[in-house]
Image (spheres, rainbow, N blue to C red):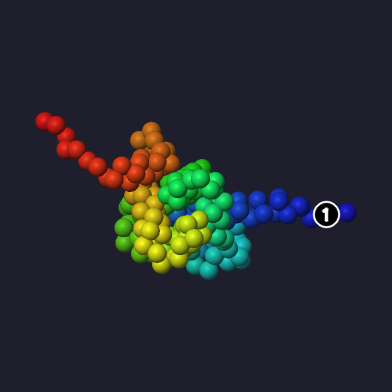
Amino acid sequence: MTTSPPDGLRERKKRATRSALQISAVALFRRHGPDAVTVEDICADAGVSPRTFFNYFSTKEEAVFLLEEGVPSLIQQRIIDRPAHEAPLEAVHAVLAERLGELTTGGILVGRAALLRERPELLPRIAQTHRAVQDAVVAAVAARTGLPESDLYVCTTAAVAFAAQQAAVACWQPDSGDDAVTVFNRAVGLVRNGLSWEPPTR
């Protein structure tokens, strides 16, 4: 008698299928432009059926930009669960760096960052994704500090950490020899140093 695979295996297969669809969508958007790509094209490239595609995404744009289900909540909980002695910015930095490393390893971040550099007109389409993550960071900082989510310290900490991550992704060059996390760490270092700057000597 054939038995169903364990939940862990089933979930891994679902994540692999979702990732394959996203990688194909990003690659095709870069190669042909968003308007020329269809859901059928993405499915053919990923080796799945359109029916499978719509189990994960409603549109081709979602395949490029949508976060995995539950990611904002996962980020929020990871920040809350960081050691209590860590300052809020330190806790947020650690979790966002971990998440950035996961995306880099999966290969999606590289293609997505390149796509946004090549086609800046797509930047507004990822705004909702960014907002969901930033809201999760705000909620986590509020939980760690006991302050309301509307507090200036909470909102500023979340905004600065998130902006540093976005700046790092925008400036990161995959062929530079540095990984995205290293660039993000440098960006947070600049924040910690008050963005101090000395003009180059001539």
Q: Do we see residue 192 in this rendering?
A: yes
Q: Position of residue 196 (x, y in %)?
A: 24, 42
The image shows residue 186 at horizontal and vertical percentages of 36, 40
Quadrant location of the N terminus? Answer: bottom right
Observer-nearest of 195 and 142? 142
- Dot 1: within a 10 Å radius of its alpha carbon, few (fewer than 14), some, or many (20 or more) residues? few
Residue topped by disc 1: 3
10 horizontally vs 17: left or right: right
Foreground of the two, 46 or 175: 175
Q: Quadrant of residue 32?
A: bottom left
Helix, strand or loop status at disc 1: loop
Is 110 drawn above or below residue 32 in the view shown?
A: above
User: To which quarter of the image does residue 68 belong?
Assistant: bottom right
Position above or below: 58 against 146:
below
Residue at 39% over, 35% down = 178
* Amino acid residing under circle 1: Thr
